[in-house]
Every structure is written in structure tokens, then in C-alpha cells.
Amino acid sequence: MKKKVAVLHSQVPFIRGGAEIMIETLTAKLRERGFEADIVSLPFKWYPNNSLLDSYAMWRTVDLTESNGSKIDLVISAKTPTFMIRHENKALWLMHQHRAAYDLASSVQAGGFHTVPGGEEMIKKITYLDCLGINEFKDKFTISKNVTQRLKHFNGIDSTPLYHPPSLAGRYYFESLGDYMLSVGRLDSTKRVYLVIEALQYCDSRIKAVIAGKGREMDNLKKLADRLGVTDRVKFLGFVPDGDLLKLYSECLGVCFPPIDEDYGYITLEAFLSKKPIVTCRDSGGVLEFVKEGENGFICDVSAEQLGKRFDELYKNKEMAKEMGNAGFDIVKDICWDNVIDELTKSIR
């Protein structure tokens, strides 16, 4: 009989991004390996403060010991606050905690708890609950070194990074080095897509920016492009189907990905699997686990001018850009799902 595995998901209704793709892909890979896997989700709302605490309480009360009279052999937790669930066999693969209580606590844009009434008390409560839930796991894994380091720094808990490939791994390809820098992902303030647009002021006027993704910053970014006089050099695509996204990666000059302290960053791996260099920032977190200055990309200060100058270097020396893309590919080409599944399911194999 197949072992039953419940993959837990704390879902923000009507939002689909990297977390949803990761959960869905993990579930599919478990099924490919012969497990009977299903996603179990509850809605997640982090505001006001009581709603966040209610989410922790809801997961604590969920009973997944069995379903329809059949034992559930393993539950896998990746997102806050799914790790609060009670089960005799829990596997942790932490994507991130509620960052407003930790590394983004002082960020107004992120609603950090240092910036809101009652926030200090919330930090204490969330830290306590996270330590309580996460310490119940025997083996503790995260999706990156960056997340592992945060967990150790803020909660004093040791864990092991467990890398995984993006969902379209095996389909990325190189076609050419074009005249545009590609930006992919949610248009959110923490992704700092505005830097990509501002950087166009400091590079050859033939270089363009193609922005794939949607989000609440869309209007602000369009206004910024208009204000800077670069509207004709910026293309906003919104949501892009998989096939079109693969083509965008294959034909871009490089990828600009300058987020604030990214957890992992699929875009990094997607760019390198397409043999394209990355331009990023010194505080971009998980991206820096793969990008090596001058070898497979460029690491800049948080400066549009610096980014723009690096765009120029790639544009004016495409042989260098090609070599960087190949170097990036060599770093990520062997990252696969088999090791992830092996580690997470070792208690039931």
C-alpha cells in the first residue's frame, strides 16, 4: 500500500506565486516517487494581529493523523504557520517564517512589527510559537542557506539547506543574447523592480527592460518609467505563460534580480539554466548563494547607476556575457528533486 503524505499549505486566497508553485511541484514529485500525496491548505491572513495568531491556532487544532479511516504517514510543512500542526511524523522544509516579525521587523513597506502598534508584543508571541512548533521536528530542513541562517540567528534553531530546482527545470534553453534585461516575478516593493527601470538612465539607450509579472507596484512602476522618460524602453508584460517565459529567458541579454534579502529566488536558477548572467545587489539574500561576482554575474550596491553600468558591460561584451551564463549553468545544472524527496521521506521509506 502506498504511504500517504500530506503537504501542508498556508494559502493567501487569490494569490499565486513561488510558494504555490513549490507546494504543487513537491506534491507532484512525491506522486512520481510512488507516494499518495495531497495538498492540505488553510487560508492565511496576517492582519490585523489577531488574525495572524488565529492562523497559528487553527493549524494547532488540525487533526491529520488519518483521513477517511486511513492513516496519514507523514506531513510536510513549508510555510508559516503550518509547522504548528500536531502529528507524530512531521518533516520540516521551511520556506520562510513571518518575516515582519524577524528580518523585516523594521520595514514600513513590509508592515514590520517594529513599525506598528502592539508590534513588540507580537514579535514575542510569534517567536515563542515558532520555536514551539519548529522544535517539534526531529529533522529540520530549509530551502536555502539564507533561511537556515535566519532561523539560527532569530530562533537559535539549527537546520540544513535543501536546494530544489524550479518547476520548469529541463525546459530552459539558450537562444541568443538580445538587447533587453529581463525582470521576472511579483511586482512587490521587496523585489525592487524600480531599480531595473532607474538603471536604464545609466546605460546605452539601445538597452531595454522587459518586466514579466504582476502585482500592486505595477502602476507605480509605469509612472516611474514615464517620469524618467524611458517608457519606450520598458515593456510590462503582466502574467506570462510558461512557453513565453522560457523564450524570454532564452533571448534576453541577462537577468536583473535585485530583491531585498530573498529567501531562495527561483529567478536565479531560471536565469542560469537559460545560460544567462545575473545582475543583483549585495543585500539580495538567497541570490548570493549562487551569483559569483565577475564569474557568472555582477553583485552591486543598491544603486541604479551601478546596475546600469553593469547592463552596459554585458551589452558591449557579449562574449563575456555568454561565458558568465555558461558558468552560472554549471553551478545549478545538478540541482534536482531526488535529494529533496529522499530527505523529506526517509522516515517512511
Image (cartoon, rainbow, N blue to C red):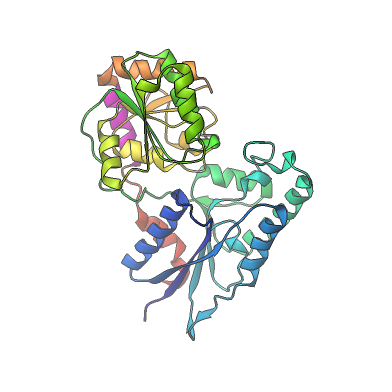
Q: Residue furthest left?
A: 175
- Residue pictured at 62% horizontal, 59% vertical: 134
Magenta region, main secondary structure? helix
Q: Is residue 130 magenta?
A: no
- Residue pictured at 73% horizontal, 48% vertical: 123
| In-front residue for pair 219/97 | 219
Q: Position of residue 252 (x, y in %)?
A: 29, 29
Number of numbered discs: 0
Q: Position of residue 14 (x, y in %)?
A: 48, 55
Question: In this view of the protein, can residue 162 be seen by the observer?
Answer: no
Which residues are the magenta region?
A: 321-332
Q: Quadrant of the rendered structure where residue 180 is?
A: top left
In the depicted structure, whether residue 247 falls above or below residue 92 = above
Q: Position of residue 181 (x, y in %)?
A: 35, 26
Q: Is residue 322 magenta?
A: yes
| In-front residue for pair 279/136 | 279
From the viewer's perspective, is 308 left or right of 85? left
From the viewer's perspective, is 276 left or right of 38? left
Q: If the image is split into quadrants, where does the N terminus sit?
A: bottom left
| In-front residue for pair 120/335 | 120
Q: Quadrant of the rendered structure where residue 58 is?
A: bottom right
Question: In this view of the protein, can residue 89 be seen by the observer?
Answer: yes
From the viewer's perspective, is 330 left or right of 75? left
Q: Position of residue 122 (x, y in %)?
A: 74, 51
Q: If the image is split into quadrants, where does the C terminus sit?
A: bottom left
From the viewer's perspective, is 150 left or right of 14? right
In the depicted structure, whether residue 198 falls above or below residue 121 = above
- Residue pictured at 45% horizontal, 52% vertical: 16
- Residue pictured at 39% horizontal, 56% vertical: 339
